[in-house]
């Protein structure tokens, strides 16, 4: 599987200088060193050469029914160009290999098919690695940005003793198996994304989430990134199935249909997640508005209770002298005036509180 984001450097798309001829290959300064692994496949045997050289490739190409060349790391553009010359790969296709960041697509040539795919980072759906696959009648070539891929189950299957469909069939079936492994690598991060959404949903409804909008927008970015990859992936698989290339067998297209179904199911899951996330954003905003309204209502009720009390305190706090006139607040001389005033104000506050409870405003 693709590696987690920890300890990885991020590669940006390498831009070709203005005026450079089409098909110019320029290595990314941060590209990983190029490493070749050659897998030789026949119905009754197989052989793998790690750290393969061009001499290994040229010397074994015509001796085996199917060869699989895996190129990890794109720093050595001279070696990549030499591979292209040996297998007749178009320079523009090789340019798409080196300039990673391509949207999933499929291109058909006279003797081979070029498929560009993206593998998700298992730790975050914000980062993807490009995997490019070329396959013809007797060869499969895979290019990837760096070591680590979802192809280990395929390698183990090739090495399995006894009847083996990967060894018995042609290169198109091996290419299908690799494409299917890339597509299936999305299931785990999509399930992890669903778990994240469920946890955020629970915390929002419980009122325990401290920064819900930050997490919701982060999840939204991951979902939008997934949508931007899965829809082109679906189109590429559909084009691969519809095309009538002679080296893509009819039986292989049946298996590719199953891979297309997987892609469609993932699109449906992502659409459901997007709708759920949209609903959560609306719920969060509604809850925030409701909490704000509750606070405003409480403050309004408190203010309403204290308005008459403040009025009474203001009236009794005026500096009138009852000796000058019987109209100048004679109650100021009352022996029990202070406790009577407090009792009167408490009675008003209690009456208002009872009224609010009766009206169900509290």
Image: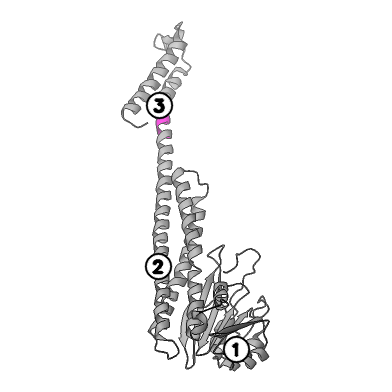
Check residue 280 for magenta coloring: no
Name the side, left or right, on which 275 lies relative to 68.
left
**Crowd around label 3: few <14 · some 14–19 · many ≥20 (10 Å):** some
Q: CA distance from mark 3 to mark 1?
A: 79 Å
Q: Which mark is residue 265?
A: 2
Q: CA distance from mark 2 to mark 1?
A: 38 Å
Check residue 301 for magenta coloring: yes
Q: Nearer the viewer, mark 3 or mark 2?
A: 2
Majority secondary structure of magenta residues: helix
Q: Nearer the viewer, mark 2 or mark 1?
A: 2
In this view, the residue farthest toward the left is 359
**Crowd around label 1: few <14 · some 14–19 · many ≥20 (10 Å):** some
Identify the mark nearer the N-term, 3 or 1: 1
Q: Is residue 234 above or below residue 284?
A: below
Segment tinted magenta in the rendering: 299-306
Measuring 48% from the left and 74% from the top, which residue is drawn there? 180
- Give the residue pinned by disc 1: 24
In this view, the residue farthest toward the front is 162
Q: How is the image coloured?
A: one colour
- Give the residue pinned by disc 3: 305
Q: Which mark is residue 62?
A: none
């Amino acid at each position: 599987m693709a590696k987690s984001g920890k300890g990885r450097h991020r590669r940006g798309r390498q831009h070709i200088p203005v005026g450079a001829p089409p098909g110019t290959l320029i290595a990314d300064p941060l590209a990983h060193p190029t490493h070749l692994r050659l897998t030789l496949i026949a119905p009754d045997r197989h052989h793998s050469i790690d750290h393969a050289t061009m001499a290994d490739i040229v010397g074994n190409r015509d001796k085996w029914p199917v060869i699989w060349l895996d190129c990890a790391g794109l720093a050595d553009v001279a070696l990549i160009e030499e591979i292209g010359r040996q297998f007749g790969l178009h320079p523009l296709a090789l340019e798409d290999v080196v300039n990673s960041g391509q949207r999933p697509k499929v291109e058909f040539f006279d003797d081979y098919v070029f498929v560009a795919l993206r593998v998700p980072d298992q730790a975050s759906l914000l980062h993807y690695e490009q995997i490019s696959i070329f396959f013809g009648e007797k060869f499969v070539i895979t290019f990837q940005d760096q070591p680590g891929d979802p192809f280990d189950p395929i390698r183990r299957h090739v090495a399995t003793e006894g009847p083996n469909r990967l060894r018995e069939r042609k290169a198109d079936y091996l290419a299908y198996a690799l494409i299917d492994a890339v597509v299936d690598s999305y299931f785990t991060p999509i399930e992890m994304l669903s778990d994240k959404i469920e946890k955020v949903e629970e915390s929002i409804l419980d009122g325990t989430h401290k920064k819900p909008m930050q997490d919701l927008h982060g999840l939204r970015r991951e979902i939008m990134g997934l949508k931007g990859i899965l829809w082109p992936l679906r189109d590429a698989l559909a084009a691969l199935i519809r095309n009538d290339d002679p080296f893509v067998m009819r039986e292989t297209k049946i298996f590719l249909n199953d891979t297309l179904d997987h892609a469609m199911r993932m699109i449906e899951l992502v659409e459901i997640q997007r709708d759920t996330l949209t609903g959560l954003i609306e719920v969060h905003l509604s809850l925030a508005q409701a909490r704000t309204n509750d606070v405003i209502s409480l403050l309004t009720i408190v203010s309403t209770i204290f308005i008459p009390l403040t009025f009474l305190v203001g009236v009794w706090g005026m500096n009138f002298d009852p000796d000058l006139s019987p109209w100048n607040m004679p109650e100021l001389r009352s022996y029990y005036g202070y406790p009577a005033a407090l009792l009167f104000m408490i009675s008003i506050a209690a009456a208002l509180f009872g009224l609010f409870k009766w009206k169900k405003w509290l």
